[in-house]
Amino acid sequence: MADIIQLLPDHVANQIAAGEVVQRPASVVKELLENAIDAGSTFIKLIIKDAGKTLIQIIDDGKGMSTTDARLSFERHATSKIRSAEDLFSLNTKGFRGEALASIAAIAHVELKTKQEQDELGTQIEIEGSEIKSQEVVVTPKGTSIAVKHLFFNIPARRNFLKSNNVELRHIIDEFHRVSLAHPDISFTMFHNGSESFNLPKSNYRQRIVNIFGGKTNEKLVPVEEETEVLKVSGFVGKPEFSRKTRTEQFFFVNNRFIKSAYLNHAINAAFEGLMKDGSHPSYFLNLTVDPKTIDINIHPTKTEIKFDDEHTLYAILRSSVKHSLGQFNIAPVLDFDR
Ligand code: ADP
Ligand code: MG
């Protein structure tokens, strides 16, 4: 008899997990922004160099970490957000898998500085490829700064597969839009190669949309509000005459989390039926609030796809509430004579 099974060393397991969680610089941006939000931050700053290939840094003013937690945060399955499987059904945080920091630290150089309000001094940790290089006591403001450098330094195949800076930056901006739209009550700034790309002050939802997509957006927004026992819908749709050739202004948030859903998208298209030219897409910025017990967000590591208990009912409510809003604004159908 020969035994051949071994447990993988942690750094190998982390690198494998990283393959799922971190596809590109934008994935790191998403995970770190979400951590900053979960930490209760009111101001979040994102600093990017070379579309995230050389540097992704996030500085927040959230609750920070103790020295022990700072070290633990890089362990796999280490999380402060859930304690038992039941907690998955009452989640009010973005994170819960305890995998992001461990994954990121497995494939990049990471420098963490963090301090809790009540502490005089903070902690600085440097970690490269899952290996802790240094840990020191530092003077640092309340909150957390995480700098991620040289992403995929130890996985050349991944590094070489990254797209051009323009494409990678586009993905980063998409994540930044999604997270900042879901949290208008938090201030966000973004800097790329030293210049400011976004400066979003704390505001209401309409202002946040306008701050991101420009002043012209304001006049096209039609409010949508609906509350039933199973679903609360709030947000805006674009008037049909402003519909676009691209789908870049389509956002669903479920319990403040950006999600993709072809099925719910179809519900919106159905509500716009007869109001738009073929080949154009409505803009929408819709927040859906449901009982966390009725969804499963744990079907994919990046959590952008979720499973609803009762998709059909949500579809019907969404469609009718959007239709109702469009009707209230007296929107005449677009008669497409010139085709
Ligand atoms: P998760 O978010 O799923 O818990 P992460 O690997 O992203 O897993 O983070 C691990 C833990 O590190 C978090 O549960 C949290 O306690 C802590 N942490 C991470 N980022 C921050 C931050 N910006 N501020 C305070 N604590 C943080
Ligand atoms: Mg996280």
Image: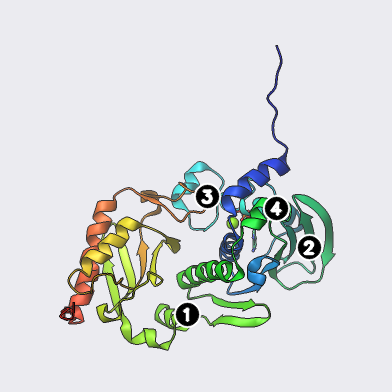
Q: Disc 3 and disc 4: Cα gap in Å? A: 23 Å
Q: Amino acid at mark 1?
A: Ile
The numbered mark at residue 334 is none
For discs 2 and 1, the disc positioned in front in the rendered view: 1
Coordinates of residue 174 in the picture (x, y in percent)? 50, 69
- Whole-angstrom CA distance, mark 2 to mark 3, is 29 Å
- Numbered tag placed on residue 123 in the rendering: 2
From the image, state whether disc 2 or disc 4 is nearer to you: 4
Q: Quadrant of residue 167?
A: bottom right
Secondary structure beneath dot 1 equals: helix
Task: Give me the C-alpha separation between circle 2 and circle 4.
Answer: 31 Å
Give the residue type at disc 3.
Pro
1 and 3 marks in contact (CB < 8 Å): no
Residue for point 42% across, 61% down: 255
* Quadrant in which residue 316 is drawn: bottom left
Quarter of the image that includes the C terminus = bottom left
Reading the chain from its start, which is encountered first: label 2 or label 3? Answer: 2
Residue 4 visible in the displayed image:
yes
Return the residue at label 4: 156
Which residue does the numbered mark 3 point to in the structure image? 301
Q: Of the two numbered discs 2 and 1 on the same chain, state the one appearing first in sequence.
A: 2
